[in-house]
Image (cartoon, grey):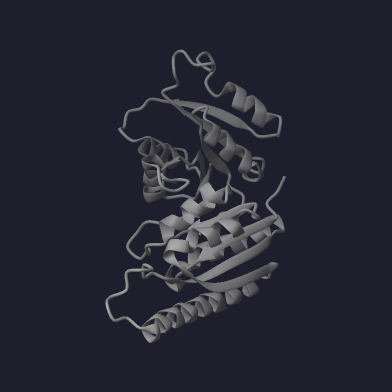
Amino acid sequence: MSYKSLLTVLTAAETATAPLAQVAALAEEFGAHADALCLGVDRTQTGYYYAGANAMVLQETLARAQEEAEAIQAGAVETLQRAGVPFATDSGVAQIADLGRHVARHARFSDLVVLGKPYGKEKRAEAEPIVESALFEGRAPVLVVPDKGEPLRRPKTVLVAWNESIEAMTAIRRSLPFLTGADLVRIAVIDPPQHGPERSDPGGMLAQMLSRHGVTCEIDVLSKTLTRVSDILNRHAADTAADLIVMGAYGHSRFREAILGGATRNMLEQAAVPVLMAH
């Protein structure tokens, strides 16, 4: 198993550097094809233009978004050409309320979606919905990369968050190309239930499954000494010099398919290394 179709979604030139460098590095590492979807975003809300707004104002907004998309695309072409990997780029304009549909359609046909962190000083309003759409509507694994640092290629140590959930197992299966190439995979189990099916051997069946793929595993049973699970995982990742964190993505919403849950959001806010998530 390998990643052969990679996708990144770019909506701002100032935040495109890290995801572009990462998708280029992975395309070279796995012999994959890199796709860059470059979108100019109309951030005005349909139906909420000020009184008296006319067609010229609306046209100017769309023209500005189109110019932004073309500038982002030019930067993506330059980066990917320099990397020497097979690639394609596409550009367009999307209203922020309709952004998810475009992202999900492209993510659905990708083995891995590479995105920048959705939180931070320079991040725009659409960054979080793009992650949500790729995960929950596109049903694709998403690799979220920090703004700084060397691009991930073949991680030596991977930290896997295991809580027996479907989401966690989905993330593990989708990360197998990374896991099989790692020197060590650490299975982190936080406060395993005393009466669950794995009570006598937490993480044991997962370690057995992965070992059959040639993965070297160690199981770390951790106490919940901090309030947030994300803080425990990030601290353990730092203590073990992990290059990548793998975990399930959790969401909830009454009005759309899903939005990021608190634990998922906290992890993406705090992680210092790339995080691979799947739902």
- In the shown orientation, is residue 234 left or right of residue 186? left
Q: Position of residue 268 (x, y in %)?
A: 41, 49
One can see residue 117 in this view: no
Q: Position of residue 262 (x, y in %)?
A: 36, 42
Query: How many labels were placed on the picture?
Result: 0
Judged from this view, the residue extending furthest toward the bottom is: 56
Nearer to us in this view, 111 or 255: 255
At 72% from the left edge and 58% from the top edge, which residue is drawn? 31
Measured as percent of width and height from the top left, residue 48 is found at 32, 69
In the displayed structure, 236 sits above or below 37; it is above
The one nearer the camera, 16 or 10, is 10
Q: Quadrant of residue 233?
A: top left
Identify the image quadrant of residue 148: bottom left
Q: Looking at the image, is 198 positioned above or below residue 71?
A: above
Q: Is 197 located above or below residue 100 in the figure? A: above
Q: Residue at x 54, y 76 (%)?
A: 75
Q: Quadrant of the N terminus?
A: top right
Between 6 and 210, which is closer to the camera in this rendering?
6
Q: Is residue 99 visible?
A: yes
Seen from this angle, which residue lies furthest left?
51
Image position, residue 277 (x, y; %): 52, 45
Could you tell me which residue is drawn at 51 percent across and 31 percent down?
A: 162
